Amino acid sequence: MARARRPATRDARIMTDRTEGLADGTLAAIRTAAQSRAGTDPAHDWLHVVRVERLGARIAEESGACVGIVRAAALLHEVVSLPKHHPESHRSGELCAEAALEILREIGVEEATSEA
């Protein structure tokens, strides 16, 4: 049995209105930085990142989490994605976290927010 989809207007509201925890324009800057670093592997490409952002925003909305912070984390979760057989692939998560923090610093996000 197929799961009923939420109305597109609800998704759109979550995607645009709920950015608490972030200054105006910050999420747009994060999106630009993340998209410029998106890979081409279909499992880790920009469309994957957007799907994760949408799902994360819905879950955050329903659970009372800070939607803006969850959206930012989702956008940044693939800024470094080494191929499976790369000798440093085991460090992808660590390298991604370091790159994400650097992006947030460059954008001017406060350290306490970046560490969230």
Image: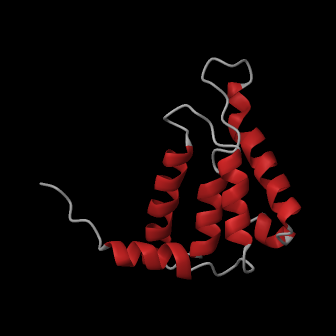
For residue 71, side relative to residue 42 (left or right)? right
Quarter of the image with the C terminus is bottom right
Kindly identify the residue that appears in the image at 12 percent across and 54 percent down.
1
Query: Which residue appears at 34% of the width and 72% of the height?
Result: 8
Question: Residue 78 location, x and y as percent?
Answer: 63, 44
Relative to residue 17, is residue 39 depicted above or below?
above
Residue 94 versus residue 14: which sits nearer the camera?
Answer: 14
Q: How is the image coloured?
A: secondary structure
- Residue 40 position in % (x across, y down): 58, 33
* Residue ID at (67%, 29%): 82
At 46% from the left and 79% from the top, the residue drawn is 13
| Any part of residue 61 in sight | no
Indicate the quadrant where residue 22 lies.
bottom right
Marker count (numbered): 0
Asked if residue 44 can be seen in this view, the reply is yes
Q: Classify 89 as above or below 7.
A: above
Q: Position of residue 20 (x, y in %)?
A: 64, 81
